[in-house]
Amino acid sequence: MQIKNKKTGKVLLEVPGDTLERANLSDVNLSDANLIGANLYGANLRYANLRYANLSVADLRYANLRYANLSGADLSVADLSDANLSGADLRYANLSDANLSGADFSDVYLSDANLSGADLSDVYLRGANGIDLSSIPQKEETSIGLIKQDFIDVAVGNILSFSDEQLRKLISVLECIIAYFEVRGDCDMILNPLRSELTVYRGMMEARKES
């Protein structure tokens, strides 16, 4: 299989077989590569240079992209669920409508990355740099969407009078807010009371289930 430059058509790399699934591509230089729709399931791309590569619609589930250079890369509609991108450079990358659920984004660089429409459910973002969560348009059911759209609905009023659904929503909102401040770090003055509140509300929910 040949991997070619998206602009010139020049062959950048030849690999045996007709798929890149679970391929070992660590440290390779694939800048400006045409990898549209590529099957990179479980591939090892640790330290790979993928600057400005076109990886749109690619299957990158469970891929190892630790410390990879993906600056300016097109990852729109790509499936990166459960991938490891710890320490990767994603500055100016296009991640619009990508599936990032369960991915490890710890210590990544995301300045000016496009995350519009991306699925960020269960993404690990501790230490991520350059991400502005408030600027990410999210669907109502996603974690950031819950913070934006539902907090006012459930964070006021008498908690004891809340329905089970309202209480569940409040717990979800608090979990998302706590996760947000954990990513920022050094926010114990905010986090400690929030965690205490969350413990109380979880206890209320458990008590309701038992009654």
Image (cartoon, rainbow, N blue to C red):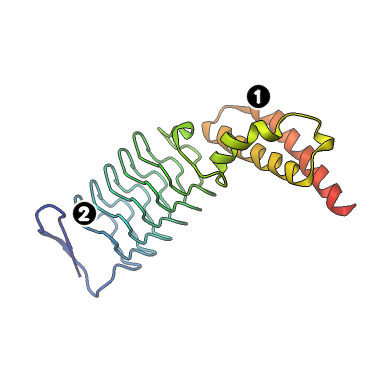
Would you identify the image quadrant in which residue 45 lies? Answer: bottom left
Q: Residue at x 69, y 42 (%)?
A: 169
Circle 2 crowding by C-alpha within 10 Å: few under 14, some 14–19, many from 20: many
Left/right of residue 199 with respect to residue 142 in the rendered view? right
For the N terminus, the quadrant is bottom left
User: Residue 52: x percent and y percent?
Assistant: 23, 46
User: Residue 7: x percent and y percent?
Assistant: 12, 52
Q: Secondary structure at mark 2?
A: loop
Going by the numbered disc 2, the residue's amino acid type is Leu
Return the mark for residue 189: 1
Q: Is residue 13 placed above or below 67 in the rendered structure?
A: below
Q: Residue at x 32, y 48 (%)?
A: 68
Sequence-first disc among 1 and 2: 2
- The residue that mark 2 highlights is 30
The residue nearer to you, when weighing 163 against 197, is 163
Q: Residue at x 32, y 51 (%)?
A: 75
Return the mark for residue 63: none
User: Residue 60: x percent and y percent?
Assistant: 37, 59
Distance between the Cα atoms at labels 1 and 2? Answer: 45 Å
The residue nearer to you, when weighing 169 against 87, is 169
Circle 1 crowding by C-alpha within 10 Å: few under 14, some 14–19, many from 20: few
Q: Is residue 150 placed above or below 118 in the rendered structure?
A: above
